[in-house]
Image (cartoon, rainbow, N blue to C red):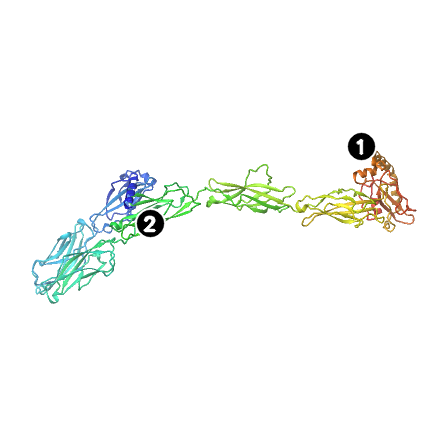
């Protein structure tokens, strides 16, 4: 598996266009000011400066710190911040800062290395400002007394080059140089025997000078105390101690034990140990037991921070003599650092129409451990949409491998796991949350294939009758749905402009009052459109059904409700119960139960004689006719529908009871019923008589005309059975009603100041007047001839009598 990953990395590296095999190298002096020119990177990389901006050029450092800045406009590489060589590279002989120049479209890398040249910006520094030596007066000339070398952070010729004593004296000189492993040393050399009695103490300065230009120096004070006999200095068993320590060694672990011996005895043979630490290691991770010489850890070590530690241990006896040894501690790496993943670029949200192979993220992986512990591999969790593709060295690309659909998955959680090759291996993971941005690829969808809405007729204008609803699987503006009425309507479908739809909510309104009798249903097409670009739409049919209200009263067709007098039906007095007198015919413009009609007898001259069928409207005799029944009967039939509340109409009928069809005149009413008050003056009586005489001739002409018509009808229809009937009666029998001319009777009583005007039975020419029903006419009354019907409607009372005032208003044809 590791070999396969290496092969993939090599292939990816070969696929990177124009990747340079040799780095671009520059050099710059440390402590250069910010903005100092390092070099023209565009020119050295053979790139036009315009491509740096067009291809989004940027610098990627391995440690993540940007020491340099690229000017995309000119292609110049300049210093981003102050560079301290000693801070970046410590005491390394060479200090090189490496980074990559990354360009996109297409992906291209250039490795750049900048070497920092040291300048003499540090002076030598001694570990101690004052050094004291206790020297026996018996010390032989040539005796050497070791000193701690001065520490200079600069390197090469800028480091410490010479040492000197000031002021110079005849007893001591300074010796310096390098021994094994290039370790430098400084020693005071006794040039002349000491004499405590002549000079018990001496003071002078030790000066260290570096080789910079101009040179820098450091000084420490030397204090010499001349002692009496202690002629043996401690001696370490080794001049240099080498030891290896695991970086995960716990605090307090013993690293090693140094040992020094002194051939002197007593206090001069007692040895104590202490560190003589360098300046750069003042915050040491070690401590030494002054009696036993055991060196222990005071805090955990970190291989990644420092892989070696150099310690200087001094052994001093009771007489003041001392010896120094070096302890070199090598820190062994353990797999204590998990791999790291550093993201260079990340694109989110990602359009859902992105093609497979689209780069989502570019990242690098690294491990601070060394060896196998620092070998890193990365993998992707189970994914069918994304994959990892090696880009360059330890760079990887997260790319898409299949089509995206935001409506199916709006967000992907992609976890990249990085593992090293240590034992046990350490892992780390990074999660990329890739949001998928929407495109308008879904049209609105109605929640029903069609809608049916209802409204009652006579509705209030702008009444809400329902709502349509459509949903869009997209988001944002692509999912914002607006509604409208579609312009195209099928010609065969009933449609009206009375409907309106709210563009935001989809609510459907009826704009005006509807009449069920004129419009029973209507269909419109509602369109739902989203706000995408271009917009997508869907249509749905909305059917509006108008519900009937009981807003139409029954209409009587027969008898016709005209302005003339009510028609009369002829009923023979010999008719039995159940005899069909007439039939009321009515219709209702409503529908359903609102049009179900029922018929009821509202008023009648004799309610017990007639009956009305509730369903058919047929008027029949309830019982046989008797002699006591009145000749003329008035009936009012109520026609009522079945609505809530019900509406009704009335039909007026008149029925004449005849013994035979030769009976022309109706009897007078009884004297009891003729006593209605009315004041008629002599002038009125004279006027009535004059009018009757004037129209007598007109009546005769009218009768003659009717007789002529009767003969013509007989010739046309061959009515043999009607030969013995008067023409008016035959015509009435054929039409089902009596003719309109009526006979009026004026009775004047000699002993009364009142006059009466009564409606009598219709005038039927050709019929011989019958005797009065009471047995004879009145002895003191004068009967005027019959005249035509007056043109002005006059409503008689139940007895058939009108008043004189009504009679004065009559005009006759």
Few, some or many residues within 10 Å of mark 1 (<14, 14–19, 20+): few
- Residue beneath label 1, please? 716
Q: Is 736 placed left or right of 317 in the picture?
A: right
- State which tag comes first along the sequence, 1 or 2: 2
Most extreme residue toward the bottom is 266
Few, some or many residues within 10 Å of mark 2 (<14, 14–19, 20+): some
On the question of residue 224 being in view, the answer is no
Q: Is 337 placed left or right of 310 in the picture?
A: right
In the displayed structure, 672 sits above or below 813; it is below
Q: Is 253 placed left or right of 138 in the picture?
A: right
Instruction: Kindly state the secondary structure of the residue where label 1 is placed.
Output: helix
Q: Which mark is residue 438?
A: none
In the displayed structure, 642 sits above or below 106; it is below
- Residue beneath label 2, please? 417
Q: Position of residue 410 (x, y in %)?
A: 42, 47
Label 1 or label 2, whichever lies nearer to me, is: 1
């Amino acid at each position: 598996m590791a070999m396969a990953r290496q092969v993939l990395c090599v292939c990816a590296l070969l696929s990177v266009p124009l990747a340079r095999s040799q780095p671009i190298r520059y050099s710059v002096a440390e402590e250069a000011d910010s903005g100092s020119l390092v070099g023209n990177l565009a020119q050295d990389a053979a790139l036009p400066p315009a491509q740096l901006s067009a291809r989004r050029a940027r610098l990627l450092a391995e440690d993540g710190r940007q020491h340099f800045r690229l000017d995309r406009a000119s292609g110049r590489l300049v210093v981003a911040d102050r560079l301290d060589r000693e801070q970046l590279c410590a005491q390394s002989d060479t200090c090189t800062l490496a980074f990559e120049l990354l360009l996109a479209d297409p992906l291209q890398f250039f490795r750049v290395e900048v070497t920092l040249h040291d300048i003499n910006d540090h002076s030598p520094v001694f570990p101690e400002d004052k050094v004291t030596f206790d020297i026996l007066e018996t010390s032989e000339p040539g005796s050497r007394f070791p000193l701690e070398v001065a520490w200079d952070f600069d390197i090469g010729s800028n480091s410490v080059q010479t040492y000197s004593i000031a002021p110079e004296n005849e007893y001591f000189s300074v010796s310096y140089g390098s021994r094994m492993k290039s370790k430098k040393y400084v020693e005071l050399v006794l040039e002349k025997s000491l004499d405590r009695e002549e000079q018990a103490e001496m003071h002078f300065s030790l000066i260290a000078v570096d080789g910079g230009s101009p040179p820098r120096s450091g000084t420490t004070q030397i204090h010499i105390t001349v002692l009496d006999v202690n002629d043996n200095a401690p001696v370490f068993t080794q001049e240099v101690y080498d030891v290896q320590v695991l970086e995960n060694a716990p605090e307090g672990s013993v690293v090693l034990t140094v040992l020094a011996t002194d051939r002197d005895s007593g206090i001069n043979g007692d040895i104590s140990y202490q560190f003589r630490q360098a300046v750069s290691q003042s915050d040491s991770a070690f401590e030494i037991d002054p009696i036993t010489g055991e060196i222990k850890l005071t805090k955990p070590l970190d291989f990644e921070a420092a892989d070696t530690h150099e310690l200087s241990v001094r052994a001093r006896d009771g007489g003041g003599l001392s010896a120094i040894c070096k302890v070199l501690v090598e820190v062994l790496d353990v797999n204590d650092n998990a791999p790291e993943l550093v993201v260079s670029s990340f694109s989110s949200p990602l359009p859902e129409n992105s093609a497979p192979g689209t780069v989502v993220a570019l990242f690098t992986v690294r491990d601070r451990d060394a060896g196998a512990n620092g070998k890193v591999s990365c993998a992707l969790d189970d994914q069918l949409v994304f994959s990892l593709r090696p880009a360059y060295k330890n760079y990887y690309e997260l790319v898409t491998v299949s089509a995206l659909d935001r409506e199916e998955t709006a967000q992907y959680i992609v976890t990249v796991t990085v593992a090293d090759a240590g034992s046990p291996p350490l892992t780390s993971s990074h999660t990329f949350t890739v949001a998928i941005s929407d495109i308008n690829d879904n049209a609105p969808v109605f929640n029903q294939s069609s809608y049916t809405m209802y409204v009652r007729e006579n509705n209030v204008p702008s009444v809400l009758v329902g709502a349509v609803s459509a949903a869009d699987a997209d988001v944002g503006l692509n999912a914002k749905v607006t509604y409208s009425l579609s312009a195209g309507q099928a010609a065969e479908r009933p449609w009206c402009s009375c409907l309106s739809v709210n563009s935001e909510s989809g609510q459907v309104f009826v704009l005006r009052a509807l009449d069920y009798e004129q419009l029973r249903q209507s269909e419109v097409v509602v369109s739902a459109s989203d706000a995408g670009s271009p917009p997508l739409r869907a249509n749905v049919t909305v059917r509006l059904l108008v519900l009937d209200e009981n807003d139409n009263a029954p209409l009587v067709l027969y008898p016709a409700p005209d302005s003339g007098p009510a028609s009369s039906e002829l009923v023979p007095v010999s008719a039995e119960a159940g005899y069909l007198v007439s039939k009321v015919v009515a219709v209702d413009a409503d529908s359903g139960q609102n049009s179900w009609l029922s018929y009821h007898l509202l008023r009648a001259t004799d309610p017990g004689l007639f009956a009305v069928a509730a369903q058919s409207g047929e008027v029949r005799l309830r019982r046989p006719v008797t002699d006591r029944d009145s000749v003329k009967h008035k009936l009012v039939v109520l026609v009522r529908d079945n609505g809530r509340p019900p509406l009704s109409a009335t039909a007026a009928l008149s029925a004449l009871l005849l013994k035979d069809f030769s009976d022309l005149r109706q009897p007078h009413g009884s004297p009891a019923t003729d006593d209605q008050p009315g004041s008629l003056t002599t002038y009125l009586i004279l006027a009535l008589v004059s009018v009757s005489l004037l129209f007598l001739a007109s009546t005769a002409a009218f009768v003659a005309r009717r007789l002529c018509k009767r003969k013509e009808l007989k010739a046309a229809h061959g009515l043999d059975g009607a030969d013995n009937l008067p023409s008016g009666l035959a015509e009435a029998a054929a039409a089902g009603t009596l003719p309109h001319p009526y006979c009026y009777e004026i009775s004047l009583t000699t002993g009364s100041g009142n006059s009466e005007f009564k409606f009598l039975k219709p005038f039927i020419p050709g019929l011989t007047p019958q005797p009065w029903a009471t047995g004879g006419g009145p002895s003191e009354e004068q009967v005027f001839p019959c005249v035509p019907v007056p043109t002005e409607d006059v409503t008689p009372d139940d007895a058939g009598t009108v008043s004189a005032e009504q009679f004065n208003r009559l005009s006759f044809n």
